Image: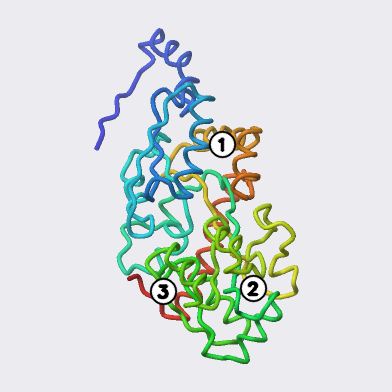
């Protein structure tokens, strides 16, 4: 136990000095940041999470006048990187690149996750939503969601879909669709998004829920067709394509949510400073052009409480389908 020193009335000068200095101690994080800040990206360089983190991180560096140090720690669906962040002091100098796989899905897949994302992670800001779409091979005779639902029901247990692996968002999204359509679909897991999309293009699989960015070349070549946007809003990356909800079909929207997180216990003032700087970065013209026009992402820039609620809501939705289907981590 720490010893407590009692200051008596015999030291008025010291008490006066302490009272004068007290406001400085009452403002945790007031000097943040006073040294380089790390952004731990729990995926390999060059991926979506890495690109998003570096674009925003550069703007944070410019605003703060401090270098940003990027650490890519991929593996186990992003959980290794988040675990590394949580082993750092809760002072804002270690920021994690948050994704659904590590924050809302992993706890339902792994029997022994080294952290509790709903208790140990503090959301700072949702940066962007990456649009997911439901696409079919060009030979599949459907042009909209109603057609796809009708086909899935007529071929109950015969229509197959691909995913980037068991427990991935592409896997969970298709299971959510099958449940909402009251149709049995056959899962064909691949080791990554690229081989799964190659399977879609060649006709090995009939359909797939995929992020629009890697899907684009297959659509442009005419080997795949986008049926609908699976997310909560349309995307500039697929002009004129309506959402599943707009087409009158009800299911959980599928958005790839990327943000910044810190360990729980980080001073709220520090959390708010990171949030404010991030929101300011998202409003910059070059950042908006990069995310919205070039990549087709939807910029968010919400509050820490908003992001925290989204993490929990995603966890509840994905947890239900993982339990229902009995999905386990590979």
The quarter in which the C terminus is drawn is bottom left
Residue drawn where x is 53% and y is 30% of the image: 59
Quick one: which residue is furthest to the top in this view? Answer: 13
Few, some or many C-alpha atoms within 10 Å of disc 3 (few <14, some 14-19, many ≥20)? some
Mark identifier at residue 278: 1
Q: CA distance from mark 3 to mark 2?
A: 22 Å
Q: Residue furthest front?
A: 221
Q: Secondary structure at mark 1?
A: helix
In x, y percent, where is residue 216? 58, 58
Mark drawn on residue 251 = 2
Q: Earlier in the sequence, mark 2 or mark 1?
A: 2
Q: Which residue is mark 3?
A: 189
Q: In percent of the image, x 46 and y 36: which residue is there?
A: 267
Question: Marks 1 and 3, Cα distance to the nearest angstrom?
Answer: 36 Å
The residues tagged by marks 2 and 1 sit, at their Cα atoms, a distance apart of: 31 Å
Element on which disc 3 rests: strand
Residue at the image point whose x is 49% and y is 73% from the top: 202
Sequence-wise, the earlier of marks 3 and 2 is 3
């Amino acid at each position: 136990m720490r010893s407590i020193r009692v200051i008596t009335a015999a030291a008025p000068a010291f008490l006066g000095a302490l009272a004068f200095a007290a406001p400085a101690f009452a403002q945790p994080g007031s000097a943040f940041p006073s040294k380089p800040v790390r952004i731990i990206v729990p995926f390999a360089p060059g991926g979506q999470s890495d690109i998003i983190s570096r674009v925003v991180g550069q703007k944070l560096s410019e605003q703060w006048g401090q270098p940003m140090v990027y650490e890519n720690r991929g593996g186990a669906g992003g959980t290794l990187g988040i675990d590394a962040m949580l082993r750092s002091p809760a002072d804002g100098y270690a920021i994690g690149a948050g994704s659904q796989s590590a924050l809302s899905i992993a706890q339902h897949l792994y029997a022994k996750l080294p952290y509790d994302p709903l208790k140990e992670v503090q959301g700072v800001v949702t940066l962007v939503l990456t649009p997911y779409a439901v696409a079919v091979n060009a030979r599949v005779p459907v042009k909209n969601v109603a057609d796809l639902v009708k086909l899935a029901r007529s071929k109950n247990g015969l229509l197959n879909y691909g995913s980037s692996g068991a427990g991935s968002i592409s896997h969970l999204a298709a299971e959510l669709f099958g449940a909402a359509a009251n149709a049995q679909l056959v899962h064909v897991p691949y080791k990554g998004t690229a081989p799964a999309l190659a399977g879609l293009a060649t006709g090995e699989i009939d359909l797939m829920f995929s992020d629009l960015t890697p899907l684009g070349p297959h659509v442009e070549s005419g080997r795949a067709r986008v049926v609908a946007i699976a997310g909560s809003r349309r995307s500039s990356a697929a002009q004129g394509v309506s959402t599943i909800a707009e087409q009158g079909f009800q299911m959980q929207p599928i958005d790839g949510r990327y943000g910044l997180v810190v360990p729980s216990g980080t001073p709220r003032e520090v959390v708010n400073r990171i949030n404010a700087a991030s929101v300011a970065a998202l409003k910059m013209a070059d950042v908006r052009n990069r995310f919205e026009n070039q990549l087709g992402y939807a910029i968010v820039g919400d509050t820490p409480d908003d992001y925290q609620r989204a993490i929990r809501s995603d966890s509840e939705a994905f947890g239900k389908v993982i339990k229902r289907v009995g999905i386990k981590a590979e």
